[in-house]
């Protein structure tokens, strides 16, 4: 038997990118504690549609915590206060009956609001376009394990690759910096042999694209706490090291150690 | 996600280099490069703070020894270099580090402000309307932008007080730093300024010492924990050392009684120092 929650919601409503936007108060009654946060919003939206009102727009897709589409600043914390959890995986049992919940979009200058809680995170795509790939020709499929990869390197690379690109790091950062996202994408490719040939070119170009959209890191560590995948701050240090190396390196010496 | 009909703020970059400067100036164009400069100058300035504090401990040996220490700074390099030349090189280097440290900090703050600027739809400085609890950001890291200017103002005050002797007037004796320190710090408001400024300095150093490793990319999960310990240790040592001067002058443990040489008798101080 699950308990039911009656909640008050303060939700950010904004008609479009150029609208000023404002908070609106909604009540959500009879919410099951087994619902996810997004399912709770679905219930609120159904009520709004029945009343002939415009439903609240929010981003969502897989609803199993791996796609990075859902966002939301819940009570001032990206993806809510639950650690290592996306909004879609956040259960209503984490909230108390009668609580007022404030819901806002992820905010940064590079994340303009499209409508209500939906923000345009395409600045992340610009960073990926700048080098978040391996583009060397590899020929036909080779035998498995032909390229030796140390277990530790593949583990660390995989930790970085866990980044789902949701933007919680930028939203939580007082400087609106995207260091954690960019360093995760760089760490993912720069730690394994397959990424080495373009390592420094990639680092330079992704970092400089990041800096053209986002703020500068002051090492608070808020991003790591907000990250649903718990990406480590160590990747930021790794990126800082590789960036200065990339700047100092003479490309004509590439391949020489 | 449908593209908005009109260009929203933020779809355009906030910062674009007009041209790429030649190496190594191009490193300073990027935010990471500036953080790197901030960290390196931070190490230099931290080194100065530590050496300055250790040097000042000579005050516990007495007026003669403090005079001797001050004199040996002026004659650094011995007979090889003109008197005070090396001291001036060090001073100018220190001033250059200060300028770079402050410029990089200020310009990066401006970039971060721009990156959150048009996002402030709630109004004011706040990014979000709801009450925000910082999870990881500590008091030191959030107040770097306040402790920094406090330290700069204090530095100017400190120079005017004990290097130029602006308000000690006739009481200021060039060549008798022991007396100058006692004369200045026995004034309660001045002692309070020294205490407050040094607490700000220590808070600044606490975050800076931890943060500089991150900025320079000197990072290893094996010793990451030690970075916090190191920051606490350095901040603690500086706190105890620097606060001991105003406190002990005020308490009366450092005073002008029982001196071998009279106040202002620099010739006597030099003569006594010769005996060592």
Image (cartoon, coloured by chain):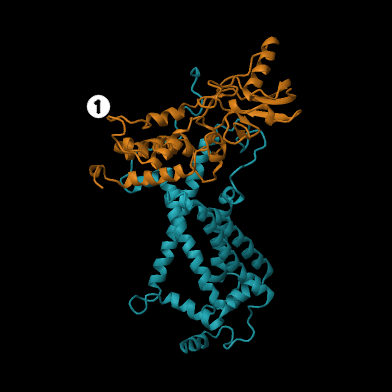
Camera sees residue A217: yes
In the rendered picture, chain A carries what hue?
orange
Which quadrant: the N terminus of chain A? top right
Assess disc 1: are there few (<14), some (14-19) or many (≥20) residues with their C-alpha within 10 Å of its C-alpha: few
Q: Image point 59% across, 87% down: which residue?
A: B262
Tell me: B172 left or right of A195: right
Q: Quadrant of residue B235?
A: bottom right
Task: Locate residue A8, reporting x and y percent.
Answer: 73, 25
Would you name the residue on which mark 1 appears? Answer: A139
Tell me: B18 left or right of B168: left
Q: Secondary structure at mark 1?
A: loop
Q: Give the vertical position of B66 relative to B45 (above or below).
A: below
Q: Image point 46% across, 37% down: which residue?
A: A159
Tell me: B23 left or right of B254: left
Give the letter of the cyan chain: B
Task: Locate residue A101, reporting x and y percent.
Answer: 69, 29
Residue at the outermost front position: A144
Q: Give the vertical position of B59 relative to A128 (above or below).
A: below
Task: Locate residue A72, reporting x and y percent.
Answer: 59, 28
Camera-side residue: B101 or A5?
Answer: A5
Please give the chain letter of the residue carrying mark 1: A
Task: Locate residue B104, reporting x and y percent.
Answer: 46, 49
Q: Image point 44% across, 50% down: which residue?
A: B220
């Amino acid at each position: 038997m699950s308990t039911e929650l009656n909640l008050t919601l303060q939700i950010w409503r904004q008609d479009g990118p150029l609208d000023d936007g404002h908070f609106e108060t909604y009540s959500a009654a009879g919410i099951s504690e087994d619902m996810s946060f997004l399912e709770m919003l679905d219930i609120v939206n159904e009520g709004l549609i029945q009343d002939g009102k415009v439903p609240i727009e929010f981003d969502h897709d897989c609803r199993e915590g791996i796609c990075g589409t859902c966002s939301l600043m819940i009570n001032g914390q990206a993806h809510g206060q639950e650690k290592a959890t996306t909004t879609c995986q956040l259960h209503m049992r984490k909230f108390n009956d009668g609580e007022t919940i404030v819901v806002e979009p992820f905010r940064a200058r590079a994340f303009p609001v499209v409508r209500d809680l939906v923000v345009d995170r395409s600045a992340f795509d610009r960073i990926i376009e700048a080098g978040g790939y391996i583009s060397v020709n590899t020929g036909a499929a080779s035998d498995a394990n032909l390229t030796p990869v140390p277990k530790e390197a593949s583990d660390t690379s995989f930790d970085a690759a866990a980044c789902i690109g949701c933007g919680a790091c930028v939203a939580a950062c007082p400087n609106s910096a995207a260091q954690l996202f960019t360093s995760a994408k760089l760490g993912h490719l720069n730690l394994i042999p397959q990424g080495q040939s373009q390592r420094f070119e990639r680092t330079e170009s992704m970092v400089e694209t990041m800096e053209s959209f986002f703020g500068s890191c002051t090492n608070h560590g808020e991003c790591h706490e907000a990250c649903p995948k718990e990406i480590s701050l160590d990747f930021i240090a790794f990126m800082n090291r590789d960036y200065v190396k990339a700047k100092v390196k003479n490309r004509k010496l590439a391949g020489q150690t | 996600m449908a593209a908005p009909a009109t260009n929203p703020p933020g779809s355009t970059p906030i910062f674009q280099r007009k041209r790429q400067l030649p190496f190594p100036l191009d490193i300073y164009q990027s935010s990471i490069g500036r953080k790197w400069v901030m960290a390196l100058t931070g190490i230099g300035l931290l080194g100065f703070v530590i050496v300055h504090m250790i040097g000042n401990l000579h005050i516990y040996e007495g007026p003669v020894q403090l005079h001797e220490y001050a004199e040996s700074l002026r004659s650094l390099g011995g007979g090889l270099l003109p008197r005070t030349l090396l001291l001036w090189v060090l001073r100018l280097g220190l001033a250059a580090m200060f300028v770079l440290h402050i410029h990089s900090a200020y310009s990066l703050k401006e970039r971060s402000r721009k990156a959150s600027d048009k996002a402030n739809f709630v109004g004011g400085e706040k990014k979000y309307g709801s009450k925000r609890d910082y999870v990881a950001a500590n008091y030191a890291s959030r107040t770097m932008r306040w402790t920094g200017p406090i330290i700069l103002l204090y530095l100017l005050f400190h120079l005017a007080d004990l290097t130029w002797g602006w308000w000690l007037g006739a009481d200021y004796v060039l060549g008798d730093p022991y007396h100058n320190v006692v004369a200045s710090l026995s004034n309660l408001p001045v002692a309070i300024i020294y205490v407050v400024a040094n607490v700000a300095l220590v808070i600044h150093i606490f975050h800076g010492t931890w943060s500089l490793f991150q900025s320079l990319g000197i990072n290893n999960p094996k010793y990451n924990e030690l970075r916090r310990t190191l920051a606490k240790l350095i901040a603690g040592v500086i706190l105890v050392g620097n606060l001991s001067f105003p406190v002990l002058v005020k308490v009366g443990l450092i005073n002008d009684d029982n001196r071998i040489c009279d106040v202002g008798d620099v010739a006597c101080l030099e003569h006594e120092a010769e005996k060592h």
